[in-house]
Amino acid sequence: MTNNKQKKNPTDSELEKKDNALRSGVLNEIGKYHYGEHASGIKRFVRSEPRKIVVKDNTTIKKKETEVLPDVKLELSNLATNEEPLTKDKVVKHLNWKIWLSIVLGSLVLLLVVFLTAVYSFRIDKKIPDFVYSLPLPLAYVNGSMLSLSEFNSEVMTLQKYYDRIIAENGSSETISLNEIENVVLERMIREQIVSDFAQRNNIVVTNEQVNSELSVIITDFGTEDSLKEFIIANYNWSLDDFKNKIIVPYLQREQVTAWFVDNQSVQIAAQDNALKVKNDISNGIITFAEAARKYSDDLVSAAQEGSLSVFTWGTMIPEFEDAVRMLAVGEISDPVKTQFGWHIIRRDSLPADTTDAENYASASHILIRDFNFDKWLESEREKSKPLIFLKIDNNKN
């Protein structure tokens, strides 16, 4: 008698059960991949190692190692599902949908290009409905800031109506072309944006109190607020708020930027050094007083007259200026003199021969070097800004 247990032969039903389990596992594994040479999403799938298939009863069956051709292409879309293989009709339908989508998108892009070309280049924008100008279309980019085409159009129409009314009232035959008006508005918008950007970078803020204070001064000049409103509507068709934002705020920004530079010590020193250089050049005969006045003076009115202020009554000029004139002999040129307006290089001139009561009068010329010349600074900033302008504007005045 032996203790070894006899090996029990599996019954037919057990073999069938295992065989079914094996078949089920193999079919599930194969069902994850759908063959199709023309299907989208095809990738190579190469099995180089034996595969193990886990069936429901956790029986692990080692699949016979097989050699798979490396060039077989298998679709791997949706591995976790048992979707049906892609058919030729489905692929064609899918491709047709993509083609139509591309055509529609391409048509929209083409229409957009044609529209923008019409607005910006061919200038048929005057025939485009007004609602177009409510769209956020750019006129230009200045130092990264966008100028609005709708605002530009509104400003052009306002200025055109203003000029037409003034010309009609004066009975003048003079005309101002649309191109001239557009160039004026474009340049003004660019320069105002440059000033606004500088103010923002340097924390220069125009407050509501400052705006209202300036508005009160203007109302006083007009007599009443209603009179000012009537003037604004008649000339610009603006509201009072429009007047504040378009006129008062830019004006105050200019004033505050100027004050910011004047308060800068290095700017004051530079202005004084500039005035001393001009004076030395005159003294050394490098340039005449008249030439220097035309070239360097920030007083444009007297600069056109070679610096001449003509005859004036004592007491009409600011004290610092008059004190310097009294110290000079006729023909003598002063060192730079500081006043609230900047630095003056003064020459005392002779009075006309027929002047009576000569002790009450004086004659002088000057060259004014401001601590800060806003217009020169802005012109320099304008040249450096190199704005990107989208709208085509003819620079011809006719």
Image (cartoon, rainbow, N blue to C red):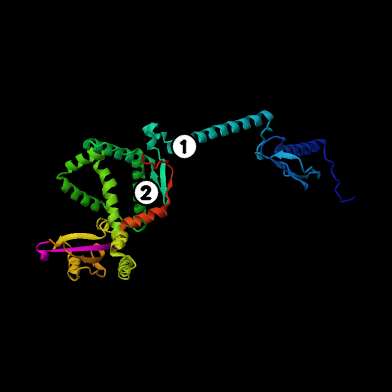
Q: In the depicted view, which residue is nearer to us: 305 or 109?
A: 305
The magenta stretch spans residue 358: yes
Magenta part of the protein: which range? Answer: 355-371
* Residue at the extreme top of the image, as rendered: 89
Q: What residue is rendered at 24% in x and 51% in y?
A: 211
Q: Amino acid at mark 2?
A: Ile
Q: What residue is rendered at 68% in x and 35% in y?
A: 39
Tell me: 234 left or right of 156: left
Q: Is residue 132 visible?
A: yes
Q: Which residue is mark 1?
A: 117
Figure quadrant of residue 309: bottom left
Q: Are there few (<14), some (14-19), or many (20+) residues within 10 Å of tag 2?
A: many
Q: Which residue is mark 2?
A: 190
Q: In the depicted view, which residue is nearer to us: 384 or 325?
A: 325
Q: What residue is rendered at 82% in x and 38% in y?
A: 11
Figure quadrant of residue 369: bottom left
Tell me: 366 left or right of 31: left
Which of pointers 2 and 1 lies earlier in the amino acid sequence? Answer: 1
- Residue 185 place in picture, x, y as percent: 34, 44
